[in-house]
Image: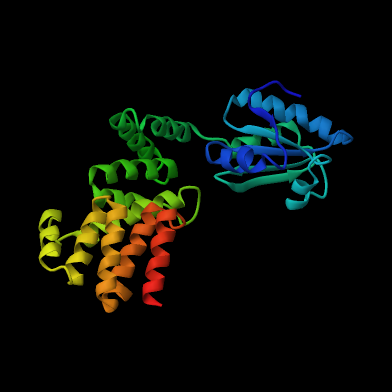
Amino acid sequence: MSKSQWVINVTEATFQREVLERSKERPVVVDFWAPWCGPCRMLAPLLEKLAAERNGDFVLAKVNTDENPGLAAAFRIEGIPAVKAFHGGRLVMEFVGVLPEPQLREAINRICPSEVDKLAVQAAGREAADPAEAERLYRQVLEQDRKQELALIGLARLLVGRGQDAEAAELLGRLPPGGPFAAEADRLNGILALRKQAAGLGDEAKLRQRVEAEPNAAKPRYELGCVLAAAGKYPEALAMLLSAAERDRNLAKKEVREAMLKVFQVVGVRSDLADDYRDRLRQLLY
């Protein structure tokens, strides 16, 4: 067994974390093998050699099929050695048997990050501490590859944080549906939609005055809820929107419901906050 930090043993209990989750950071190549398998003993040193050479470009995860039959069954392993590579939580490459070293290198090269990809990862690491430098690096990446997904989502996130919504929307529009950044893209698009919805409704202080002056009116509460949501005050926004729904069922069925769905998109569709207010709105409407 290689002593490289980029070669790990994986079990049924750790596969989700060590392979699928880790593959969102870097490719993970899974080697399904067994101690009695002669070809496995031929392939393993080649894979371990490449893992050491690439020094973190990918992780080699070794699965003993004798000890982890559930994984072998789940991935329909009928012959070993079987190799399956994951990136972004998705299967991106697979083969069965022993490949000649040149062919194996070519396969690994196809799934490993390019220099542009590495620059995007570097930018992501600078986002919190040095957003200006992160932006510079992201833009440098996109000059070379306008579809590089990590740079698109990272730069869009920075721009949303600064209120540069038009450029952020254009960047998010370049991302393909699905993929490892779909949830974050949905969140950012939700923020943009809430801001657009609140545009022209007035400022928070004046809307609060209207709510106080017209305590039984639904429309001021709906508008204040939209403005609060656009400002990122999500729990208060949902409470205000629900109070508008309680006062006007017709408003609740369309405008309030749509506004609350946008908030759910931002806070997490299956978050505790979203679940709570989804149930409360459902009880009110049905």
Q: Quadrant of the C terminus?
A: bottom left
Q: Is residue 51 visible?
A: yes
Provide residue 20's location: percent of width, then percent of height. 60, 43
In which quadrant of the rendered view does residue 200 lie?
A: bottom left
* Scheme of image coloration: rainbow
The number of callouts visible is: 0
Please provide percent x and percent y for residue 162: 24, 42
Q: Nearer the viewer, residue 61 or 197?
A: 197
Depth check, front residue: 168 or 46: 168
- Is 14 located above or below residue 133 in the figure? below
Q: Residue at x 16, y 68 (%)?
A: 215
Q: Position of residue 38 (x, y in %)?
A: 88, 34
Work out whether 53 lies above or below 116. above
Say which of 57 and 213 sits in front: 213
Q: Position of residue 267 (x, y in %)?
A: 38, 52
Q: Describe residue 111's horizontal placement relative to residue 104 as left or right.
A: left
Q: Quadrant of residue 216?
A: bottom left
